[in-house]
Image (cartoon, coloured by chain):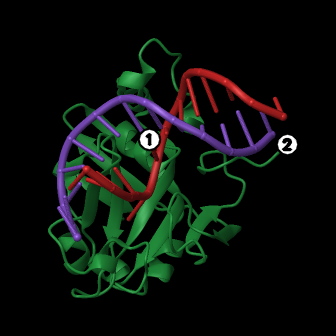
Chain colours: A green, B purple, C red
Amino acid sequence: MILSVDFYRRPTLEVARDLIGKVVVYKTTAGITAGAIVEAEAYIGEDDPACHAAVGPTTRNAPLYGPPGRAYVYLNYGLHDMLNAVTEDEGHPAAVLIRALEPLEGLALMRRRRSRAPWRKGKPPVPDHELCRGPGNLCRAMGITLADNLRPLTRGPLTIQDRGITHEDIAWDPRIGIRVGTDKMWRATVKGHRSVSGRRLKA
DNA sequence: CGTTCGATGCACT
DNA sequence: GTGCATCGAACGT
């Protein structure tokens, strides 16, 4: 079942927690890819220094100010697309960054797309659990690009669905990969999951 | 094991 | 011109 707008029109931390286990599905002409969310981060409002809305409304962050349930996709470091789900009421800029998925469908297609990255030329195929490990990697594996910015996640080719996956042990940790706002424990992960990004725990 | 650093494009100042 | 919600290779210990 596809998540409705009401799912996203809620406090962002609740949405982030509830997105764990939900399934991102993207249907393209190349085929279908899908993966269950195992890592997500909340970015909330102009007072959150790490949120793109911290500088006030701009062309780039406009989607954050729009209605919930849409994709906010942007390019980072000139190389990596980032997928967010816009949350809260219109006018309240906030979103959840999808940071990692457990691949479920279309693994071969994901592998092909990952291998297509310039820096992967001549390298061995990406292991299954690493196909969607990290926000840049998952977008590349799923074929999500800037062209998908503002797309509704509630209908159409790019959706997030509830397929009944539940997780008992969800951890809240500091957000990673940012230079400010690292004090906030707004990163939700499935504890110990192999596809969660960041440094791995020891054996 | 750990840390450093280059690639790369666009929005923003 | 600057800096970035990254990735992965290269290097140091």
Which residue occupies 38% across, 62% down?
A: A161
- Going by the numbered disc 1, the residue's amino acid type is Asn
Judge from the rendering whether residue A58 lies leftward or rightward of residue A50; answer left or right.
left
Residue at 55 percent of width and 32 percent of height? A128
**CA separation in Å, label 1 and label 2:** 24 Å
Share a chain, discs 1 and 2? Answer: yes
Quadrant of the drawing holding the C terminus of chain A: top right
Q: What is the total number of numbered labels drawn onto the structure image?
A: 2
Identify the image quadrant of residue A8: bottom left
- Judge the density around disc 2: few (<14), some (14-19), many (≥20) Cα neighbours within 10 Å: few
Question: In which quarter of the view is residue A188 placed?
Answer: bottom right
Does residue A144 appear in this view? yes
Residue at x 50% of width, y 62% of height? A178
Q: Residues within 10 Å of mark 1 (few under 14, many from 20)?
A: many
Report x, y in % for residue A4: 30, 75
Residue A184 drawn at (x, y percent): 58, 78
User: The residue marked by circle 2 belongs to what chain?
Assistant: A
* Callout 1: SS: helix
**The disc label shown at residue A203, or none:** 2
Tell me: A33 left or right of A103: left
On-image quarter of the N terminus of chain A: bottom left
Frontmost residue, A136 versus B1:
B1
CB under 8 Å between discs 1 and 2 = no
Choose between A187 and A154: the one closer to the eye.
A187
Dot 2 falls on a residue whose secondary structure is loop
Amino acid on which the number 2 mark rests in the picture: Ala
x and y percent of residue A78 in the render?
A: 30, 43
Residue A137: give its label: 1
